[in-house]
Amino acid sequence: MSSSNEIIRHGFADAIGNTPLIRLNRFSELTGCEILGKAEFMNPGGSVKDRAARAIIEAAERSGKLKPGGTLVEGTAGNTGIGFAHVCNARGYRCVIVMPDNQSNEKYQMIETLGAEVLRVKTVPYSDPNHYQKIAGRLADEIPSAVWGNQFDNTANRDAHEQTTGPEIWQQTGGKIDAFVCATGTGGTLGGISRFLKKQNSKVRVTLADPQGSSLYHWLRNGELKATGPGSITEGIGIGRVTANLEGSPIDDALHITDIECVRTVYQLLRDEGLFLGSTSGVNVAAAVQIAKQLGPGHTIVTILCDNGAKYQSRLFNKKWLAEKGLLDAAGLSQNGQPTLLDVAKNVANVGAFPQRLSA
């Protein structure tokens, strides 16, 4: 792996990591804290999951399970599949991705464009034998020379973040970090980063940000895997079990983040910070703001900016979809009687010119 000060990266896998830490100016000013986002959307495959994909493949190569010309099979909600497809292309492996049918169309299309074989399956609970992860495991057993990535319980995922993301955050903050918070899907990012940071300073407060419908908030608060309300619009985070990557992680607390809070924050990031990000980043930053308010001014809170918003345009950035979910107000897109630019444009012929000032 290249050192952080090298200019040339040797191929796709070597370009993963060493992402910037971005100060979220508006949120920092409002809270009096330094709220920093690790810009994982700047990885070459576009998300934090590039790190797990690289680590899992490299671990399989070292063990001898994944041989030249072999096949990587994975069950994923999208971003890990994108990462795997990229790394497999770069290293000459066949890539087979099993996905639940409740994800954004952009994710399916992107993975197929990258050349992976995509199998969409019905969304069912994890206890069902036809859950997408379990189907992926069976496929790997049936396909010759295939390896199952098993991102949820393969601790190479967690190790990637303990060995790379955590040290990067520590170095970029100069060790001056009071709290770290992020949501979890596989547990790899939170599990790995929390392990590293706690080894450096046991006083760093680690918090899990949990979307509505997930069970981890109650698990951390009272030891019970109990869902918090209806399912969330978020994709790839919030689960009903404790994965191998998450088990034993030094987590201090959990926050429950609603879809309203998530969507509001996503649109604030876009309008106030100029950052076009996905729903998990909304959950993460909303939680970081809550922690800043709890700790008070003068503290440094770090979170993860997981991926950009391009994969969510048909949903999270679609007014019709948001309206169906009752989230237009949260996004700040309901008009409340104010004319839109389109309304004004339709009347240009009548008024002769654009008005001098348009309502925001």
Image (spheres, rainbow, N blue to C red):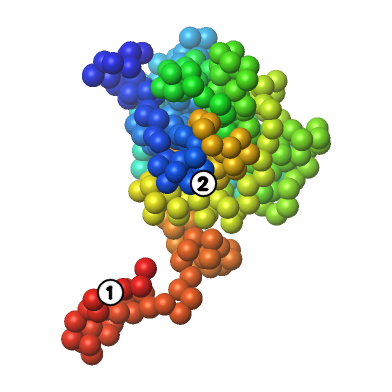
Camera-nearest residue between 90 and 159: 159
Identify the image quadrant of the N terminus: top left
Q: Is residue 222 above or below residue 122?
A: above
Q: Position of residue 51 (x, y in %)?
A: 45, 25
- Give left or right: position of 308 versus 226: left
Residue name at image x 52 percent, y 9 percent: 63
User: From the viewer's perspective, is 206 left or right of 298?
Assistant: right
Mark 2 vs 1, N-terminal side = 2
Query: Cβ–Cβ below 8 Å for labels 2 and 1?
Result: no
Residue 169 lies, in percent from the top left, at 46, 23
Q: CA distance from mark 2 to mark 1?
A: 31 Å
Residue 75, given in percent of the width and then of the height, sits at 56, 35
Q: Vertically, is 318 above or below 215?
A: below
Q: Which residue in the structure is indicated by mark 2?
A: 282
Dot 1 corresponds to which residue?
A: 357
Q: Categorize mark 1 by other alpha carbons within 10 Å: few (<14), some (14-19), many (20+).
A: few
Viewer-proximal residue among 226 and 261: 261
> Residue 110 occupies which quadrant of the picture?
top left
Judged left or right of residue 131, residue 176 is: left
Image quadrant assignment for residue 98: top right
Label at residue 28: none
Q: Quadrant of residue 271?
A: bottom left
Residue 338 against residue 249 in the figure, above or below: below
Q: Amino acid at mark 1?
A: Arg
Disc 2 is placed on an element classified as helix
Callout 2: 10 Å neighbours few (<14), some, many (20+)? many
Tell me if residue 298 can be seen: yes
Instruction: Name the residue located 61 percent from the left edge and 35 percent from the top edge.
Output: 295
Residue type pointed to by label 2: Gly
